[in-house]
Image: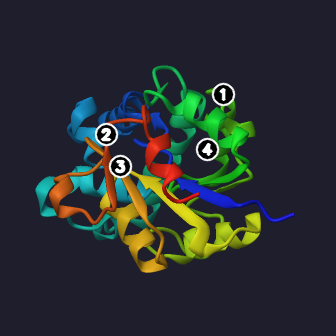
Amino acid sequence: MEQQYTILFDLDGTLVDTAPDLMHAHNHVMRKFGYPTKSTDEIRNLVGQGAGAMLGRSIWGQAKKEFGKVQDENIKKEMVKDFVDFYGKNIVNESTLIRGVKEFLIWCKEKKISMGVCTNKQEHLAIDLLKKIGIYNFFDYVAGHNTFDYCKPDPRHLTSVVEIIGGNIKKTLMVGDSETDANAAQSAGIPIILLEDGYTEKNTTEIYHNHLVKDFHGIEKIVLKYL
């Protein structure tokens, strides 16, 4: 039986505040390769498009040059590998659920809402994080950066998960915290609930959204309008 509604979630900065552990992994790599380290708040502005993009944006700061500008391909691969290896071993040391997440996921299950995660984190890291932080079993499907041949802001990252879950695009909501999430949702024709203070350099006024929330407390009132 097709469930009545689907909600898709971003992971970093939406379900889980992962910035502290990402910072430690980032700084581990930066120190090893001779680049400046970053604070947790700075990391929050860099997260969203995968490890390689985050490291590249960090190295070149405000220039926003792509990671591909590193000439030595082997060094580039080694940096990303070191980041993923270190982060994978230290994935939930300081990461915490965003306020109200667990209660909202329980409410969604009670309402028979199907749920999926669409993240630009590597799939195995996303699944491991969700398991270790205790919310993996709420989700019908988890799609990471490398699950398909495309990822956010490509709308197919979202639409493919809805299709796999057996949902309906016209009965789907997205919850995210950055322009990467918002642009994917807008292109897919899916309404988006945007969290304030997301992992982005942009102000919420610069990011497309249908609803704006501080955290997950009271978000049920918005969702009920769509059910």
* Earlier sequence position, callout 4 versus callout 3: 3
Q: Which mark is residue 125?
A: 4
Which amino acid type corresponds to the residue marked 4 in the rendered image? Leu
Q: Residue at x 30, y 57 (%)?
A: 56
Dividing the image into 4 quarters, which one contains the N terminus?
bottom right
* Earlier sequence position, callout 2 versus callout 3: 2
Question: Relative to residue 68, is residue 221 drawn left or right?
Answer: right
* Residue labelled with disc 3: 47
Q: Which mark is residue 30?
A: 2
* Earlier sequence position, callout 2 versus callout 4: 2
* Residue labelled with disc 1: 132
Q: Say few, some or many: other residues with alpha carbon within 10 Å of mark 4 (under 14 / 14 to 19 / 20 or more).
A: some
Nearer-the-camera pick, 107 or 40: 107
Q: Nearer the viewer, mark 1 or mark 4?
A: 1
Circles 1 and 4: CB atoms closer than 8 Å: no
Image coordinates for residue 58, horizontal then vertical, percent: 25, 50
* Earlier sequence position, callout 1 versus callout 4: 4
* Earlier sequence position, callout 3 versus callout 1: 3
Which amino acid type corresponds to the residue marked 3 in the rendered image? Val
Q: Residue at x 28, y 31 (%)?
A: 40
Circles 4 and 3: CB atoms closer than 8 Å: no
Nearer-the-camera pick, 6 or 154: 6
Q: CA distance from mark 2 to mark 3?
A: 15 Å
Q: Secondary structure at mark 2?
A: helix
